[in-house]
C-alpha cells in the first residue's frame, strides 16, 4: 500500500499543453479513477506516475518520496494496459511470471507467488494455456496477475476493460474492486466511462483539458458538482442546465436571481404532476425508466419518469421538483450553491 501525491504536474509537447498544473493526493489503499473525455490528459498523467513519460515540470511522490527522477522499475509500480500486452507464444503461467524472471526473483519464490496469484484470480486451471485459448475476461485477469505477482505497491490501469463486452465489463468491475479491497491495493485507474468511475472509485478525479475539474468521492461528485462541466459529465441522462431569466423559470420563482446564472436539475429530481406546464416532445423507453424531453417555455427539460408511465409524445404534463434538488451555477459555470 502506498500513497501518491502529484504536485503541479505540467506536460507540454511542441504546441500542445497536455497537463496544466495537476495537483492530486491519492490515499494508500484507495481506488482512484482518472475520468474525462478523450484527450483530457488521463493517460499522460498515468504514464508520468509510472515514469514512462517525463513531466515538463512538477513532482510525483510515492509514500512521501520524490520519485520524479526515478526510472519506472525503481518506483515499485505495476501497470496494466488496455491491450493487455500478453505474449502470445508464452503460457499463462509464463506470462504471469515473466517480469519475475527478468528481475531474477528466485524460482521457489516465483512459483509460490504464481500459485497464490492464480488462485486469487481463478486462473489455476488455465496456467498451461496460451493467451489465444482464453476469453477476453481471462486474458484481462492474466494481465492483472502479472501486476499482482510483482507485489507492486501501486497498480496503474489504463482503460483495462474497454476491449470487453458490456456484460463481462460489469463482472470485471465488480471483481477488480473486490480484489483491490481484499488486497488493500492502491489503484489508479483511467477510464472515459463515467458509470465505470462512479461504480468503482473511492475518489473520482475528473479531468478537463489537462486540469483537475473536481476530485471527490462519487457520491459527492454527483450530489454537488463543482462546475457545469462536472454536472454534465456525471449522470445519465445528464443534468438539465437552464439559463435563468429574471430569476425565474417558466413562471415559477427560484432561489437564485443572478442574471445569466444556470439552474441545474437532475432528470430524476423532476416529477410529473406539478404546476409547471410542459409539453412532451419526445421520449425514450428504457424498461425501468421512461426518459421524457419536455418543453417548458423555450427550455427543454429532461425528466426521468417511471417506465410504467403511460405517456405519449405531444401530451401536456405538469412538472414539479423540490427546492433542495436545485443546483445553481454562475454564468462562468462555477457552482453557487
Ligand atoms: P487521454 O488519455 O485523456 O485521452 P492523453 O493523455 O493521451 O489523453 O493526451 C492528452 C493530450 O496530449 C492530447 O491532446 C494528446 O493529443 C496529446 N498527446 C499525448 N501524447 C502525445 C505525444 N506523444 N506527442 C504529442 N502529443 C501528445
Ligand atoms: Mg488515454
Image (cartoon, helix red, strand yellow):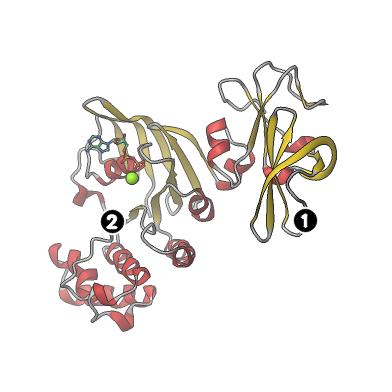
Answer with the quadrant where ligand 2 appears in the image.
top left
Residue 100, image quadrant: bottom left
Q: Residue furthest front?
A: 314
In this orientation, does residue 227 appear?
no
Look at the image and tell me whether residue 280 can be seen: yes
Q: Observer-nearest residue: 63 or 213?
A: 213
Q: Relative to 185, is 247 above or below?
A: above
The kind of secondary structure element at disc 2 is: strand
Q: Position of residue 191 (x, y in %)?
A: 41, 49
| Percent position of residue 22, x then y | 38, 32
Q: Residue at x 39, y 47 (%)?
A: 3
Residue occupying the point 68% across, 16% down = 259
Q: Give how far apart the Cα atoms at labels 1 and 2 are.
A: 50 Å
Residue on which disc 1 sits: 309
Which quarter of the figure has residue 103?
Answer: bottom left
Residue 240 in picture, x, y percent from top left? 65, 36
Residue that badge 2 annotates: 78
Q: Earlier in the sequence, mark 1 or mark 2?
A: 2
Q: Against 173, is 68 above or below?
A: above
Q: Is residue 184 left or right of residue 284?
A: left
Image height of 270 relative to 84, above or below: above
Question: Is residue 331 placed above or below 311 in the rendered structure?
Answer: above
Amino acid at each position: 500500500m502506498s500513497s501518491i501525491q502529484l504536485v503541479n504536474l505540467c506536460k507540454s509537447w511542441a504546441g500542445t499543453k497536455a497537463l496544466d498544473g495537476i495537483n492530486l493526493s491519492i490515499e494508500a489503499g484507495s481506488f482512484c479513477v482518472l475520468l474525462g473525455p478523450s484527450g483530457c490528459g488521463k493517460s499522460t498523467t498515468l504514464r508520468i506516475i509510472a515514469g514512462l513519460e517525463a513531466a515538463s515540470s512538477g513532482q510525483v511522490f510515492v509514500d512521501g518520496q520524490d520519485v520524479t527522477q526515478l526510472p519506472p522499475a525503481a518506483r515499485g509500480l505495476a501497470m496494466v494496459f488496455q491491450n493487455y500486452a500478453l505474449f502470445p507464444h508464452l503460457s499463462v503461467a509464463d506470462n504471469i511470471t515473466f517480469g519475475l524472471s527478468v528481475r531474477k526473483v528466485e524460482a521457489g519464490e516465483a512459483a509460490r507467488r504464481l500459485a497464490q496469484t492464480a488462485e486469487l484470480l481463478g486462473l489455476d486451471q488455465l496456467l498451461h494455456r496460451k493467451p489465444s485459448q482464453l476469453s477476453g475476461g481471462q486474458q484481462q485477469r492474466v494481465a492483472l496477475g502479472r501486476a499482482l505477482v510483482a507485489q507492486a505497491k501501486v497498480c496503474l490501469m489504463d482503460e483495462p476493460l474497454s476491449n470487453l463486452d458490456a456484460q463481462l465489463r460489469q463482472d470485471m468491475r465488480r471483481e477488480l474492486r473486490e480484489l483491490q479491497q481484499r488486497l488493500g491495493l492502491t489503484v489508479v485507474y483511467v477510464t472515459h466511462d463515467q458509470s465505470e468511475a462512479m461504480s468503482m472509485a473511492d475518489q473520482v478525479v475528473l479531468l478537463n483539458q489537462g486540469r483537475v475539474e473536481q476530485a471527490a468521492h462519487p457520491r459527492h461528485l454527483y450530489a454537488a458538482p463543482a462546475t457545469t462541466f462536472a454536472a454534465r459529465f456525471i449522470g445519465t441522462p445528464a443534468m438539465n442546465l437552464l439559463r435563468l431569466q429574471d430569476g425565474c423559470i417558466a413562471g415559477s420563482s427560484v432561489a437564485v436571481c443572478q442574471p445569466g446564472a444556470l439552474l441545474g436539475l437532475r432528470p430524476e429530481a423532476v416529477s410529473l404532476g406539478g404546476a409547471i406546464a410542459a409539453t412532451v416532445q419526445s421520449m425514450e423507453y428504457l424498461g425501468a425508466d421512461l426518459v421524457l424531453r419536455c418543453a417548458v417555455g423555450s427550455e427543454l427539460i429532461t425528466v426521468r419518469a417511471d417506465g410504467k408511465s403511460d405517456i405519449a409524445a405531444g401530451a401536456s404534463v405538469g412538472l414539479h421538483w423540490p427546492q433542495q434538488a436545485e443546483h445553481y451555477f454562475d454564468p462562468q459555470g462555477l457552482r453557487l450553491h
